[in-house]
Amino acid sequence: MRRKSCVFLLTLIAGLVMTGCSKQEVPTDAVVESSVAVEETVEVESSIETESTVVAEAEPEVDHSAEIEPVEGLSEDFVFGCDMSMLIAQENSGVVYYNEAGEEQDPLLTLANNGVDSIRIRIWNDPYDENGNGYGGGNNDTATAIAIGQRVTEHGMTAFIDYHYSDFWADPKKQMLPKAWVGMTTEELADAIYVFTKDSLGQILAAGVDVSMVQLGNEITNGMCGENNWTNICMMLKGGCQAVRELEEEYGKEIQIVMHFANPHTADYQKLAMRLEKNEVDYDIFATSYYPFWNGTLENMQSVLQGIVDNYGKKVMVAEISYPYTFEDGDNNQNSLYENCGSPFNYEISEQGQAEAVRDCVEALAAIGDAAVGIFYWEPAWIPVPDDTGMTRSEIWEKYGSGWASSYASVYDPNDAGKYYGGSAWDNQALFDHEGNPLSSIQMFNMMKGE
Ligand code: CA
């Protein structure tokens, strides 16, 4: 058991004994079990002796025991990764992460020790307002990517760079042009993408970051840079491809080019690969987001990716996956997933459920064979920022960009960030608990490898 949780548990139990708190007010199942034991014993024993006895007995009962079987048939090169783009903003906000022994530790090292091979890092062109205030969501510009990437390299992992070609979040619902590119023609945009990618990725490589993959555009299922004509989109993508290939040569380094899409459960998903082929876009990996509670069955996802391998000769990958371990909200910014939110949950909401959801997806990928090259867990360390620093959480999100959006993003993204800016909607899907301790599910990567 993690030392910090142990102290936390002791504190809670002490509080329960002293206040006679009812079970209903206790936040977790694990503590509820302990509190029952305490309440029964407390009548005849002194509280201090009872606490130590109960905690010692309660330890094995705490449900931190995710366990899964190794995945057979995985390619030796299969990459287990995590997207850790929020990291610097989280740390600036005062978030502290611990290792399994309860000691403060770089979460990148904790992930590396648990079998993670690669870290994905998103990049926005200019996520700042005219006064230099960050839009939030990690304020992920090239400098931030370098700061994360250097630590990733130090810990022996590779970096997977994810260009959104926007100043803020790009996904199937929005693909806003960077401010500096408004009014450009398609040809000008293709050139702007070439110049930006060459400069940004050039800086990252020059800083010594071990980049293995570069993604051009994020979840571009319905378009990119405000464009939805695929001939034009492909022309722009080719600008990015050219930049990566030139840097590959310059640095004598093999870099895989990734195209990334979302919503594999929707019709005509394979047509995306057809359009790329028809327009002769030079890339290596067709990647999809696959969120088990949003994106249909595993069988469908597997069949779609298998089709892309068979028909277009590409490698395939799941670039984003996650699963909740709790329905508790750690920062009062409503989570994307909550009880009765309407999404189907085919696994238990627990650390075990998290590990199983990811393992089943990896097994589905393994069945595709060597062409399936990896999976990345999305934002496993985006946990609540502290609320005991003299600043409110809202003030911290605004100042350090650790919420999904700050109010400063309102002018650029008035309809989404402008209305709903705030904190983390993902804290219940992390692989660290709300206090920064690694969950048992973080061991899933090594478990799947059979290590
Ligand atoms: Ca939350």
Image (cartoon, rainbow, N blue to C red):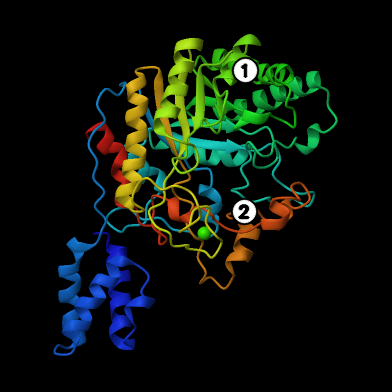
Does the image show residue 130?
Answer: yes
Residue 157's spot in the image, x, y percent? 40, 33
Residue in the picture at 72% in, 16% down? 231
What is the CA distance from the residue labelled 1 to the residue labelled 2?
Answer: 30 Å
Three-letter code for the amino acid on which mark 2 is drawn: Gly
Q: Which residue is mark 2?
A: 401
- Nearest to N terminus: mark 1 or mark 2: 1
In front here: 44 or 148? 44
Callout 1 environment at 10 Å: few (<14), some (14 to 19), or many (20+)?
many
Numbered circle sitting on residue 73: none
Three-letter code for the amino acid on which mark 1 is drawn: Cys
Residue 439's spot in the image, x, y percent? 33, 53
Residue in the picture at 21% in, 80% down? 38
Q: Which residue is mark 1?
A: 241
In the picture shown, does residue 60 fall above or below 173?
Answer: below
Residue in the picture at 49% in, 35% down? 120
186 left or right of 241?
right
Residue 437's spot in the image, x, y percent? 35, 57
In the picture shown, does residue 426 fall above or below 190?
Answer: below
Residue 289's spot in the image, x, y percent? 50, 34
